[in-house]
Image (spheres, rainbow, N blue to C red):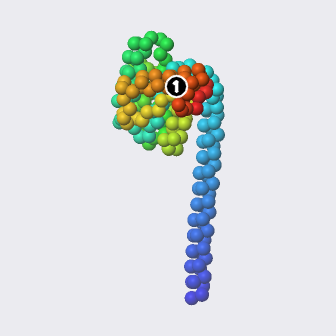
C-alpha cells in the first residue's frame, strides 16, 4: 500500500513539475518573441522618423480579419482620392497604408488585389504584422511608416465617409497650424506628419 501511494505521489509531483516547466517555458518564449517583434518594428520604423514628408495625406487603415469589408472601403477611399487629385491637381499627393494586424483570413491579399484592380499599386502599401497585436499597434505601425503631412486613421468597416468630412478637417487643422505659427492662440495640439507636430 505504501509503495502504491508513493508511486502515485511521485507521478502526481512529476506531472505538476512538467506542467509548471512547460508554462514557464511558454511564457519565456512568448516574452522573447514579443521583444523580437518590438526590435523588428523599431528597425522598420526608425528609418522614417524625422524624414521630410513626401505626400500631402496618408490614410492608415488597421485591419484584422476584414477580407469581406476591406475591398469596398479601399475602393471607395481610392476613388475619392483620385477624384480629389483630379480636382486639385498634381500637388494633392496621397497614400493609403493598410496594416494587417495578424489576420487569419486573406485581408492583406484582398488589399493588394483591390489596389491592383484599381491601378493604384503605387498609392497603396500593405504591412502585415506577424501576429495579432491589437488595433493600437497596427495604427502605430501605419503612422510611423506614413509619409504624409497629414495622417488620418480610418477603420476598415466603412464608418468614415471621406467625402463629407475630410476636407473640413484638413481646413481646420491647417487653420490652427497657421494661427499657431503666427503666434495666435491655436487652441490645442495639431496632429502632424513626420516632420513635427504633436
Q: Residue at x 50, y 44 (%)?
A: 134
Point out the image quarter for the C terminus. Answer: top right
Q: Residue at x 40, y 12 (%)?
A: 87
| Residue 126 spot, x, y in % from top left | 49, 30
Does residue 77 appear to the left or right of 47 in the view shown?
left
Dividing the picture into quadrants, the one containing residue 157 is: top left
| Residue 94 spot, x, y in % from top left | 48, 21
| Residue 139 spot, x, y in % from top left | 51, 36
Does residue 127 appear to the left or right of 119 in the view shown?
right
Point out the image quarter for the N terminus. Answer: bottom right
Q: Residue furthest front?
A: 184
Between 120 and 52, which is closer to the camera in this rendering?
Answer: 52
| Residue 188 spot, x, y in % from top left | 54, 32
Residue 13 visible to an observer of this rendering: yes
Q: Is residue 167 above or below residue 131?
A: above
Residue on which disc 1 sits: 176
Does residue 85 appear to the left or right of 179 in the view shown?
left
Residue 125 visible to an observer of this rendering: no
Between 19 and 136, which is closer to the camera in this rendering?
Answer: 136
Q: Residues within 10 Å of mark 1 (few under 14, many from 20)?
A: some
Dividing the picture into quadrants, the one containing residue 165 is: top left
- The count of marks equals 1
Q: Residue at x 43, y 20 (%)?
A: 120
**Secondary structure under the numbered disc 1 in the rendered image:** helix
Amino acid at each position: 500500500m505504501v509503495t502504491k501511494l508513493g508511486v502515485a505521489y511521485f507521478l502526481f509531483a512529476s506531472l505538476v513539475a512538467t506542467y509548471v516547466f512547460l508554462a514557464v517555458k511558454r511564457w519565456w518564449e512568448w516574452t522573447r518573441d514579443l521583444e523580437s517583434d518590438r526590435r523588428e518594428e523599431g528597425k522598420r520604423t526608425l528609418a522614417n522618423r524625422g524624414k521630410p514628408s513626401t505626400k500631402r495625406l496618408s490614410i492608415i487603415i488597421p485591419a484584422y480579419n476584414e477580407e469581406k469589408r476591406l475591398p469596398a472601403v479601399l475602393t471607395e477611399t481610392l476613388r475619392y482620392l483620385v477624384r480629389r487629385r483630379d480636382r486639385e491637381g498634381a500637388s494633392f499627393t496621397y497614400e493609403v497604408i493598410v496594416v494587417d494586424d495578424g489576420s487569419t483570413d486573406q485581408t492583406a491579399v484582398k488589399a493588394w488585389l483591390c489596389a491592383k484592380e484599381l491601378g493604384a499599386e503605387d498609392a497603396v502599401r500593405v504591412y502585415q504584422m506577424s501576429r495579432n497585436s491589437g488595433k493600437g499597434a497596427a495604427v502605430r505601425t501605419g503612422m510611423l511608416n506614413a509619409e504624409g503631412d497629414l495622417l488620418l486613421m480610418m477603420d476598415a468597416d466603412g464608418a468614415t465617409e471621406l467625402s463629407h468630412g475630410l476636407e473640413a478637417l484638413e481646413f481646420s487643422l491647417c487653420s490652427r497650424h497657421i494661427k499657431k505659427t503666427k503666434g495666435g492662440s491655436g487652441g490645442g495640439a495639431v496632429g502632424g506628419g513626420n516632420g513635427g507636430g504633436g
